[in-house]
Amino acid sequence: MERDQLIDLTRRAVKLARDKTTDFARAEHTVLATEYTSIERHDRDVAMLMASPQLVGYVSELPEPGSYCTKSVMGRSILLTRTSTGSVKAFNNVCLHRQSQVVTGCGKARRFTCPYHAWTYDDTGRLVGLPGREGFPGVQIKSDGLTELPATEFAGFLWVAMDPAASLDISAHLGPLAEELDSWGIGRWSPLGEKVLDSPINWKLAVDTFSENYHFATVHRETFATIARSNCTVFDSFGPHHRLIFPLNSILDLEDVPEDQWDPFQNMVVIYALFPNIVLSVTIANGELFRIYPGAVPGRSITVHQNSTPLDISEESVAAGAQAVFDYAHATVRDEDYRLVAGLQANLESGARDHLLFGRNEPGLQHRHISWASAVGR
């Protein structure tokens, strides 16, 4: 992000903090409880996500030719490779024979041998080895292969389309946010791994927890609220996406500092909600990625939490510190946010009330739901 833009956002954050207020939506907004519990809405949500570009990781997870990584997206296993030419490819991680996963985890390999019957594929997905070939006269070596999915690297992230026949235009998908996201560089920072939350909450309820900081003073009294202000957010929308600025408690110290001496990134957290199911959290030392997916039923979701850091983690102490920050953030989301909203999900399913109320002080929450509703035809 350009310094002038950061200074402007910081200026807005300082004013909100000084006035003890936040950016507002024009009115309150209601959402039906059934949007979190209905099977019909659940099916619409899954179809929407399957038709949308999926951000699945950082480009730094495929650092050089021969690198590969596997990802789970809505129950499907995806294999991503960086080929000898440097291009990124993606495939359904499903062997042509008996549908075993061909490979797990991440690493370096030019070939992938299925652990079931040793069918072997190269990093472009072609079948190059078939034991007992005489038993499969209809299978063509070096012609048949894994089902390829559209894939690209853009703005520092890895993207795939779940439909092999789909087009993948990430520039059009991100619109005016494309250059801004790329400028942070978090997708090229050192990756710190993945943590998975299989939770008894609807996927939209999971995304909701990242859409406002109104809850910090109560839910995160001893954690995030000791660092960042509560109910104080700079909000901007970009089509179906939005950006939130969460000012840190130190933001008002800048009032006594000339603007040309401001270090904005020391005083804010930047949150992006990328339509339809991605949350990015950017700080001076961390680039967090939350990939949030519907589960098998409306009251279940999978959150894949990743983190990256610009720090030099070749030093053991630095790596340990970065991992500790990741562990802390993950535990807070798991034990404070998701544990609390599991009770919300239970209430939603009980039918005790037929709607939820989003306040004017929750513009990110409103924008997220209005964008989803528009996409599923509601």
Image (tube, rainbow, N blue to C red):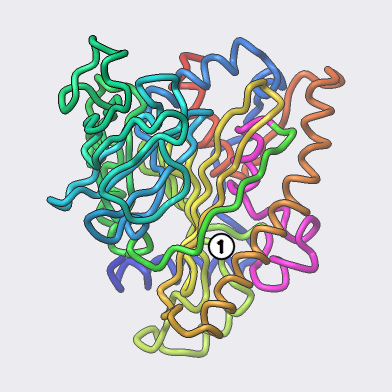
Q: Quadrant of residue 114?
A: top left
Magenta range: 202-230
Residue 130: x %, y % from top left: 29, 27
Asked if 218 appears above or below 177 in the picture, the reply is below
Asked if the stretch drawn in magenta spans residue 211, the answer is yes
Specify whether 191 is left or right of 90: right
Q: Residue at x 28, y 58 (%)?
A: 182
Where disc 1 sits, the SS reads strand
Residue 228: x %, y % from top left: 64, 68
Q: Is residue 282 visible?
A: no
Residue 292: x %, y % from top left: 55, 39
Q: Residue at x 21, y 22 (%)?
A: 144
Q: Residue at x 51, y 37 (%)?
A: 367
Which is nearer the eye, 325 or 265? 325
Which is nearer the eye, 148 or 373? 148
Q: Residues within 10 Å of mark 1 (few under 14, many from 20)?
A: many
Q: Looking at the rendering, in which quadrant would you find the N terminus?
A: bottom left
Q: Quadrant of residue 124?
A: top left
Q: Which residue is mark 1?
A: 246
Asked if the stretch drawn in magenta spans residue 69, the answer is no
